[in-house]
Amino acid sequence: MPEKAAQVIIIGAGISGLIAAKTLEEKGYSPVVLEASETVGGRVKTSSINGFKLDHGFQVLLTAYPMARKHLDYDALNLRYFRPGALLFSHKLRSFIGDPLRDITSFIPTITSVAASFSDKWKIFKLTSRLKRKSLKSIFAEPESTTAEYIENYGFSDVVTRNFLRPFFAGIFLEHQLKTSSRMFEFVFKMFAQGSAAIPNTGIGAISNQLKDQLNNTSFKFQHEVVQVQNGFVLLKSGERLKAEAIISTVPLTEDGKLDESLSWKSCENFYFEFNGGKLPVNLIGLLTEKDDLANNINIHQIEGQDDLISITVVKKHELTELELEQRLRYELETQCGIDLGKLIHKFNIKKALPNKSDISQVPKKIRQGDTIFLAGDYLANGSLNAAMASGEMAAGEVIKFLSN
Ligand SMILES: Cc1cc2nc3c(=O)[nH]c(=O)nc-3n(C[C@H](O)[C@H](O)[C@H](O)COP(=O)(O)OP(=O)(O)OC[C@H]3O[C@@H](n4cnc5c(N)ncnc54)[C@H](O)[C@@H]3O)c2cc1C
C-alpha cells in the first residue's frame, strides 16, 4: 500500500488524545487522530442503547481537577452536581454522611448518623482540612502505602471503614480491598473536598464531545486500528502504513512498538434498570454497606429528556452467571435499600476501566519512546480524567518542542 504522510499522528481519541490534539492546534498544528472505535471519548462515552442514553460506567467529573478547570467549559457542560457525601444502606436502614461545611443541610443527618462514631466524624473533618491545605505536589511525593493501611493508620474505626470509606472508595478505585495507592486516596479526597462531583446533564460523554467540538484543524479517522508504531511510521490493521514526523500514542506500547497487552487493569460491571419503586434521592451516591453485597454503589441516572434509571456498579469479582447476578442485584436492592428494580435496560462489562498500578504520579514520568514516538494516557500516571488530560498536554508540548527544533 502507498504511504500517506501526516505531520503529527495521535493514536486514540480518548480524553488524553483529545487534549493532545487541542494543545497542538493551539500552536498551529493540524494533527491526524487514528481511533479504533467509531467515536471519540474512549472510556468517557454516553451511547444510545435500547432507547436510553447510557454512560459507559458510572463516573464523575471532579470539578476541582486543575486540568479539567483549564480545558473544559463547565457552564456549557450544564453540570448536574452531586451532594457531598453518600447515603448508606443496610437492611432498609439509611444513614447519611455529608460535608456540613459545604452543605449545611447535611449537618444534623451527619452528626446523628450511626454509620460513624463522633471520633470518626472528627477525623474526616480533620483530614479534609489537612488535605485542602496540602499541595498536589506534596501528595504525590509521599511514600506510598495501600489506602487500607492509610485508613487504619489514620485511626479510622472498623465501623466507618466498613460503612462508608470502603464502599465509597471501592466505587472510585474499582477494587474492594483498597490496595490502591495512598497517594490516590489523598488526591481524590482533596478533589472531593475542594470541588464537587458532577455529570453533564446529557451524560458523561458530553465532556469528550465538548473537547472534540473545540477542534477545527484535527482530522479524525475512525475504525483505524493501529497494530504497530515505529519511528516515523504507524502500521494499521488494514495493512496501511502512515508516515509522520511525530507520533503520540495514548495506547500502551511495548519497547518494540507493538500494543502492550501486559498491563494490569481494574474492571467493573455497570447495570441500568428501570425504577419500579422505592426512594433514592437524585444527585446522591448510595452505598450498600453489608460485607457480602455485590452491588457497591447506586445512583439515579438522570439525563435530560428521558425517564430516570437506576445505575448499579458491581466491583467485587464473583462466579455468578448473568442471570444469577441480575437476580442477586434485585434481591440486594430490595432487602438493603427497599428499591424495586424494573426491567434491565443494559449492562456494561468494562474490562479495562482503570490502570492497576503502583508508584502513582501526578503526571507521567516517561513520555518519550524513541526519536519520534511520544506517550500519553492515564496509565502513565494515575487513573483519572485529570491525569489523562495532563498526559495529553505534556506529550503535545514535547512534540511541539521537538518539531520546532
Ligand atoms: C467505569 C469507569 C469509571 C471511572 N471513573 C472515573 C471517575 O469517576 N473520575 C475520573 O477522573 N476518572 C474516572 N475514570 C477514568 C477515566 O475515564 C480515564 O482516566 C480516562 O478516560 C482515560 O483516558 P485516556 O485517553 O488515557 O484513555 P482511553 O479513554 O482508554 O482512550 C484510548 C483510546 O484509544 C483507542 N484505541 C485503543 N487501541 C487502539 C488501537 N490499537 N488503535 C487505535 N485506537 C485505539 C480507544 O478506543 C480509546 O478511544 C473511570 C473510568 C471508567 C471506565
Image: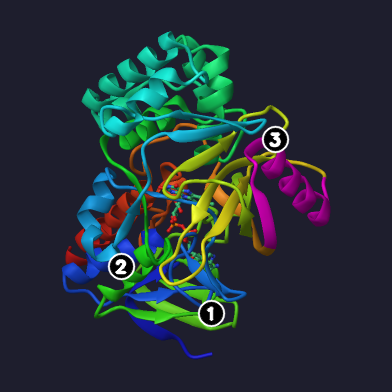
Q: Earlier in the sequence, mark 3 or mark 1?
A: 1
Q: Is residue 331 magenta?
A: yes
3 or 2: mark nearer the eye: 3
Q: Earlier in the sequence, mark 3 or mark 2?
A: 2
Which residue in the structure is indicated by mark 2? 211
Residue 247 is situated, as x and y percent measured from the top left of the image, at: 38, 67
Q: Residue at x 38, y 14 (%)?
A: 123
Give the Cα distance between marks 3 and 1.
Answer: 39 Å
Whether residue 54 appears in this view of the structure is yes
Left or right of 54 on screen, residue 282: left
Which residue in the structure is indicated by mark 1? 223
Q: Main secondary structure of the magenta part?
A: helix
Q: Quadrant of residue 215?
A: bottom left
Mark 1 surroundings: few (<14), some (14-19) or many (≥20) residues within 10 A: some
3 or 1: mark nearer the eye: 3
| Segment colored magenta | 320-343
Left or right of 106 on screen, residue 92: right
**Nearest to the observer: residue 27 or residue 277:** 277
Mark 2 surroundings: few (<14), some (14-19) or many (≥20) residues within 10 A: some
Q: Which mark is residue 85?
A: none
Q: Residue at x 30, y 27 (%)?
A: 100
Q: In the image, what residue type sits under mark 3? A: Asp
Q: Earlier in the sequence, mark 2 or mark 1?
A: 2
Quadrant where the C terminus is found in the figure: bottom left
Mark 3 surroundings: few (<14), some (14-19) or many (≥20) residues within 10 A: some
Tell me whether circle 3 and circle 1 mark residues in contact (CB < 8 Å): no
Give the Cα distance between marks 3 and 2.
Answer: 38 Å
Q: Quadrant of residue 62?
A: top left
Give the Cα distance between marks 2 and 1.
Answer: 20 Å
